[in-house]
Image: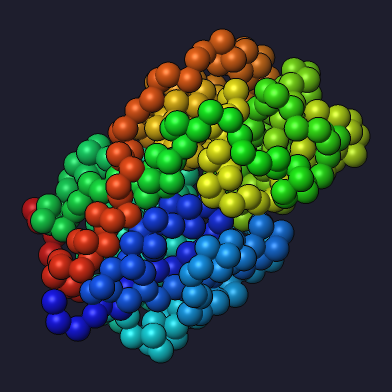
Amino acid sequence: MGRVRKICAVITARPSYSRIKTALRAINEHPDLQLQLVVAGSALLDRYGNAADYIERDGFKIDERVFMVLEGENKTAMAKTTGLGVMELANVFYNLKPDAVITIADRFETIATSIAAAYQNIPLVHLQGGEVTGNIDEKVRHANTKLADIHFVASEDAKARVIKLGEDAEFVFNTGCPSIDIAQGLIDQTELDFNPIKKYGGVGGLTVMPENYLVVLQHPVTNEYDQAKSDITTTLNVINELGISTFWFWPNVDAGSDGTSNGIRSYREKHDPKHIRFFKNMDAIDFLKLLYHSQCLIGNSSVGIRECSFLGVPVVNIGTRQHRRQRGQNTIDVTYDGAQIKQAILEQLKNPKNKRSTIYGDGNSGQKIADILATIELRFHKTIMY
């Protein structure tokens, strides 16, 4: 190879880091690549767990920090946050002069990365295009695909969809999802090797590490944001009725996350559930360990569809947030109906963890991504293929 290629990855939220962590490491260690790391958006905010702390703890150097989240957590604030992101990231890319920029998945603000790179003729790499989710994420994901020049998708289903969107098949690669690389190392682990309450604190009545437990991770749905408080209250009621020890995680910054957060706070003040512990954030590997040894994940996070399918963790997926996404056999889908949610949880508690799936990768995604980035033509011009 000739000159070392500068690959700039932009992480805008807590979940995005686990989605790309092993690829970042592989890029960082590749002799023909130089990693440039930009951390932006809610990944810098304490109330969403400040992912930047975990990134630096893992040994990565952060080249730029971009503060761009506008207060409000409503639809208008989402639009303005994205606009601010375009302006700030345009300057960052102008200064860093990367050979390629990576944008991740489908969060609303990720399109700011895509616009800032594409408009400056910087080759854009999109991770995890071609999937179906519904709500604003659906639009953003496919818009990112159309702005991107190189595509690293997580499944064959997604690859076919990206090509149907008119992308050049020679630039679409099914590498699997880098988060599966992290999950791969847990398959033979027989017991949880840390106490989440001692290590991360959290708040709530559950103070002793239980032998059996549930995990809840429920985000607002951006096109149903006005229902966020009632949706989270429905789930809280079910978990409170069941009385099973539960670790509960705060939502992402999306339209409606104020409603979700307020619903949790109000419920805690009124009912003070003694069997629930609430957390803002957790290191990606620790979070996966916690999931792997749990009885069931409840909520609407993509981790239930991806990592949990690979690990064989039973999942109760609530509502439309993961609409039409390819699933393993580990998932039961329900609506925001308390009786349905409760019945599905009880059914999953009977299921052994043996319904594992590799639809989202085999555990070597990060290295595949780095190897391709080192050799592929880095282009910034393309034409629709039909």
Q: Nearer the viewer, residue 30 or 291?
A: 30
**Quadrant of the rendering where the N terminus is positioned:** bottom left
Residue 114 location (% of width, % of height)? 36, 68
On screen, residue 83 above or below 307 = below
> Where in the figure is residue 153, as x and y percent of width and height?
28, 49
Residue sitting at 56 percent across and 10 percent down? 350
Q: Would residue 321 be visible to someone looking at this image?
A: no
* Towards the viewer: 334 or 97: 97
The quarter holding residue 27 reads: bottom left
Residue at horizontal 12%, vertical 52%? 169
64 relative to 112, above or below: below
Residue 48: image quadrant is bottom right
Left or right: residue 166 versus residue 313 is left
Q: Relative to 377, is 365 on the left or the right?
A: right
In terms of depth relative to the viewer, which is nearer, 49 or 232?
49
Q: Residue furthest bottom?
A: 95
Which residue: 64% across, 32% down? Answer: 215
Image coordinates of residue 118 in percent, x first then y, are 30, 74
Q: Position of residue 257 (x, y in %)?
A: 67, 50
Q: Nearer the viewer, residue 296 or 318?
A: 296
Q: Is residue 276 left or right of residue 129?
A: right
